[in-house]
Image: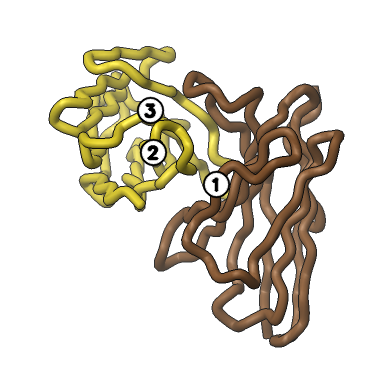
Amino acid sequence: ILNVEQSPQSLHVQEGDSTNFTCSFPSSNFYALHWYRWETAKSPEALFVMTLNGDEKKKGRISATLNTKEGYSYLYIKGSQPEDSATYLCAPRGGGGADGLTFGKGTHLIIQP
Amino acid sequence: KAGVTQTPRYLIKTRGQQVTLSCSPISGHRSVSWYQQTPGQGLQFLFEYFSETQRNKGNFPGRFSGRQFSNSRSEMNVSTLELGDSALYLCASSLGGGIQYGYTFGSGTRLTVV
């Protein structure tokens, strides 16, 4: 079972501002890292699956980077919009891929108009 | 394209009873995983099935079990229910076991044990 830390726990951001948050995980036994967005009353939605050190992924205004050597990933949101309000979860996968996803507690993002 | 379907959406059971939850993955998806979500613990991995075989299992007691059928549909069973089993149970499907595949989640089954 991996120890996954996400920070901050919650974040209030003004509409139009950019923001970022962190996911930390053990660098040993790393296999892949998933990011999900979970809006209230909906199902978690996959954002990115990242596997290689130095990976950078982008989806619209959201992007993510991965550092497997030091065990962290950053998620960036550019020009935050109210619809970005959600809990953002990271989930590393270890055990050579044989383990299930270990989710962090998430960063709860609230965009204020 | 239909998403991941979980039934029932809500369930109320009495302590000591057993319960079966169902999950139908996206057509063509062969991997199905189950997660438990509680306010204090967040999302916790229960087990994953791929082509009818359990690939891995989380740190849950043996009261929690599952299976996958040849059409990739999966069921999860909890026997001798305890109050602490009250949670949202999420099912997620994926195309395969490869590391590049993300998961598509269902809407979940909200189980309340009284």
At 64% from the left edge and 66% from the top edge, which residue is drawn? Answer: B64
Q: Position of residue A22 (x, y in %)?
A: 22, 36
Q: Between label 3 and label 2, give the one nearer the viewer.
A: 2
Q: Cβ–Cβ below 8 Å for labels 3 and 2?
A: no
Q: Position of residue A8 (x, y in %)?
A: 22, 47
Callouts 1 and 3 on one subunit: no
Q: Find the distance from the CA under tag 3 to the CA under tag 2.
A: 10 Å
Q: Find the distance from the CA under tag 1 to the CA under tag 3.
A: 16 Å
Circle number at residue B56: 1
Q: If you read the primary sequence from the N terminus, does the residue marked by circle 3 or circle 2 appear first?
A: 3
Instruction: Report which quarter residue B77 is drawn in.
Output: bottom right
Q: Cβ–Cβ below 8 Å for labels 1 and 2?
A: yes
Q: Amino acid at mark 1?
A: Asn
Instruction: State the residue in front, B67 or A51.
Output: B67
At 24% from the left edge and 28% from the top edge, which residue is drawn? Answer: A74
Chain under callout 1: B
> What is the secondary structure assignment of the residue under circle 2?
helix
Say whether residue A91 is visible: yes
Say whether residue A10 is visible: no
At 75% from the left edge and 75% from the top edge, which residue is drawn? Answer: B12
> What is the secondary structure assignment of the residue under circle 1?
strand
Q: Which chain is brown?
A: B
| Visual hue assigned to chain A | yellow
Instruction: Report which quarter residue B114 is drawn in.
Output: bottom right
Q: Is residue B16 left or right of residue A101?
A: right
Q: Which residue is mark 2?
A: A95
Callouts 1 and 2 on one subunit: no
Q: Which residue is mark 3?
A: A32
Circle number at residue B15: none
At 40% from the left edge and 67% from the top edge, which residue is drawn? Answer: B40
